Image: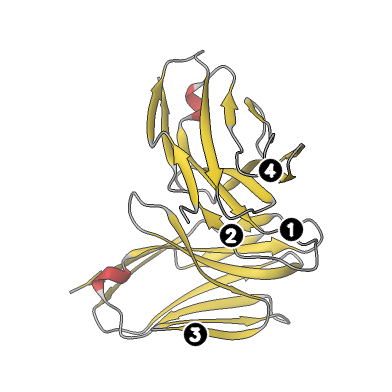
Amino acid sequence: NAGVTQTPKFQVLKTGQSMTLQCAQDMNHEYMSWYRQDPGMGLRLIHYSVGAGITDQGEVPNGYNVSRSTTEDFPLRLLSAAPSQTSVYFCASRAYRGTSFPNEQFFGPGTRLTVL
Amino acid sequence: KNEVEQSPQNLTAQEGEFITINCSYSVGISALHWLQQHPGGGIVSLFMLSSGKKKHGRLIATINIQEKHSSLHITASHPRDSAVYICAATNFGNEKLTFGTGTRLTIIP
């Protein structure tokens, strides 16, 4: 199993450009999420999904869109990049069996994004 | 105040020392996670626990539900243990993770 994969690993954008960060997992996990990691702060949830066709906002959703058309893929779209979106982005997945049964999270390798 | 607090923020120790990293949380949780992140690297799950104690090699994680406190211990520390260790809590009810800001551990040979 490849686990959770993310592309690209590095990206530089200009303010106003758009792009999509790709995330895929081959573990048949229902729950997928996107986090951003900034210096001095804990990882913060951007968007998450509990299954194909179902997405919801996290703590810091503004400026980002997601969709979940398949179990495997969960792309994150930056609509109009801003310097405040300079960060390291992590995709994660886990099995989901309801609120009484948490499961181990698996993280992708991260995407380092710089917006100029 | 962050819902998940870690201490210390930075820790430097000599090879072979016993290491303890602490995590306190203020939310109701269904599980507590310890994660490891090497410089420039990805994030790896070390432990997920909801009670008691777990051990994997030289790493031990404990949790005290009543005191809302968890510790990560490393015995016979080694330079390859140098990394950022992150505590995270699965919130009871919505299963979302709340993360601490991490403890940067440096082991000197």
Query: On the same chain: label 4 and label 1?
Result: no
Q: Which chain carries label 1?
A: B
Q: Residue B55 carries which label?
A: 3
- Decide if residue B27 is on the left or right side of residue B19: right
Secondary structure of the residue carrying tag 1 is loop
Q: Is mark 4 on a helix, strand or loop?
A: strand
**Residue B20 position within the rendered picture, expressed as x and y whole percent measured from the top left:** 44, 79
| Residue with the mark numbered 1 | B95
Quadrant where the image shows the C terminus of chain B = bottom left
Quarter assignment of residue A67: top right
Q: Which mark, by number, is residue B69?
A: none
How is the structure coloured here? secondary structure
Q: Which amino acid does label 1 sit on?
A: Glu
Query: What's the residue type where badge 2 is placed?
Result: Gln
Residue at point 33%, 54% (across, down):
B39
Contact? badges 4 and 2 (CB < 8 Å): no
Amino acid of disc 3:
Lys
- Disc 4 target residue: A48
Say whether mark 2 and mark 4 are on the same chain: yes
Real-space Cα separation, disc 1 to disc 3, in angstroms: 24 Å
